[in-house]
Image (spheres, rainbow, N blue to C red):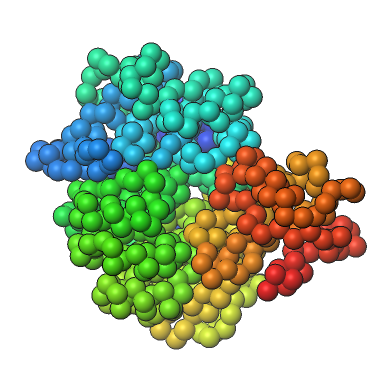
Amino acid sequence: MVDLVTPPSEAGAEPTAHVDTFARDHLPPRAMWPAMDFSTLPGLAYPPRLNCAAELLDRMAEGNGGARTAVIFEGGRWTYRELLENANRIAHVLRDDLGLVPGGRVLLRGPNNAWMAACWFAVLKAGGIVVCTMPMLRRRELCYMVDKARIGLALTDARSAGEMDAAHAECPVLRRVVRFGDGGAEGSLEALMAGKPAEFANVDTAADDVALIAFTSGTTGQAKGTMHFHRDVLAVCDAFPPHVLKATPDDVFCGSPPLAFTFGLGGILLFPLRIGAAGLLLEVASPPNLLQGIQDHGATVMFTAPTAYRAMLEMLDRYDVRTLRKCVSAGETLPRPTYDAWLERTGIRIIDGIGSTEMLHIFVSAAEEDVRPGSTGRAVPGYRARVVDEAGREVPPGTIGRLAVQGPTGCRYLDAPDRQQAYVHEGWNYTGDAYVMDADGYFWYQARSDDMIISAGYNIAGPEVENAMLDHPWVMECGVVGVPDLERGQVVKAYVVLREGVAGDGDTAKALQEFCKAQIAPYKYPRRIEFVDSLPRTQTGKLQRFRLRELGE
């Protein structure tokens, strides 16, 4: 048993189990937190001592529940008991072999598979903090996260270890990288697990100890770490799923978002495990692979973005998806034609929703019987939402304004006071979206109110792409915005000023695109490039992205 450490006054009232108090020490001051309300739903009243891994996995694996299927993956499936025992063995490795102390951050890198799920729970069981990343991220992105969250340990899928090894060599704070899925090679996670007990005494964390740090890209071009407590993880499982989704223990959940996205983490792993259902983990969840997975494994609940629904409409005739009964959309606005076409082809009303990494998951949505096509829905039970003007005053129904939300989860940025102040005002979370609320409390999306590009469900910060492009010696200036696209909603477009003597032709554009793909995650690269003589700027030199967007319309 670890010694409990008394938290600073601005953190929670319950003593922390974290020996490494970095995360708690770098929470924003309590006065800058949003108001947190747990009174609107009885199920959101959690005890002061709580380890969410114990609730989601250990409790569900008790008795006959241990024989139920927890996760399905390419080549097999694990029961709740098997997932629990593997997570317990990994927890022993983390504590006994790799020196993880409660509160330490562990980076997880890999595709959606059973090993990622087991590692996720193992970190929390050992009292650590999960920082989950996608295998597409490159060295520079990984190094930023490692430095920002002071991550000392990483567990990575062996097939995508190259960029992780490069980050390890560059980041002194990252002490060790351990591979999994390496066939039991010396030093691999599987080799270290050999002989470890199948039981583990979970660290007695406080409900308000940080459980995970989820990174999201902001309009400044730098990733922002959002910190979520153990009780937050359970709160998102006990709000949207039972009151809007209404799934059952016999359901099989599937979807395209990676576990590194909180949309995917909830929809494919946490939500099914909370009710004793199964999650289908597809390493490559392209539209055809997703449809094949539904056909092969009888999936019944699907989480994906509108772009994928549009793509799958053209493929439905080639697959048997009759088991599918519930569909959830998020990540970008759901176009009415997509909703109508999906309903006509499948008979299923897509459940639209808006969530954010800052809020952890969906907070505005509507159950199938309450859906109004074209609307995002109403505030999810446990949350409240309103539309306000620039001064924070609630506006009348039918008036465009800023979406503001309160509930059992909320924004707490890692060591980013300026961003915290921009996101949280007088206890409300401001999502950066413009909405209209009708007289019945339904919210209708209008537009993003910041410079975030949302392409095929991915959030992409234009300045981050600009920074990558500017690293190329041919590029003098670069401005990046999102422009409309029928297939992806938006695509990234770069307006580039080249250095003297460089030809602005197709070969140059292709070379810059390939360079960008090697610097940052490939989905962020500019699919369109236009060479210009100059970029629009203010008198003080600030790039006027709104003028670039006007050019792309």
Q: Find residue 239 and report its horizontal and vertical position in percent.
A: 33, 60
On the rendered structure, is 309 left or right of 426? left
Q: Of 125 and 204, which appears nearest the observer?
A: 125
Considering only vertical position in the picture, is 477 above or below 58? below
Q: Of 170 and 529, which appears nearest the observer?
A: 529
**Residue ID at (24%, 62%):** 321
**Residue ID at (80%, 55%):** 504
Residue 209 visible in the snapshot? no
Q: Of 395 and 240, which appears nearest the observer?
A: 240
Residue 155 visible in the snapshot? yes
Considering only vertical position in the picture, is 388 above or below 189? below
The image quarter containing residue 143 is: top right
Quarter of the picture containing the N terminus is top left
**Residue ID at (56%, 76%):** 446
**Residue ID at (43%, 78%):** 337
Q: Find residue 500 and report its horizontal and vertical position in percent.
A: 90, 49
Q: Find residue 15 and report its horizontal and vertical position in percent.
A: 42, 34
Considering only vertical position in the picture, is 540 above or below 13? below
On the rendered structure, is 149 left or right of 104? right
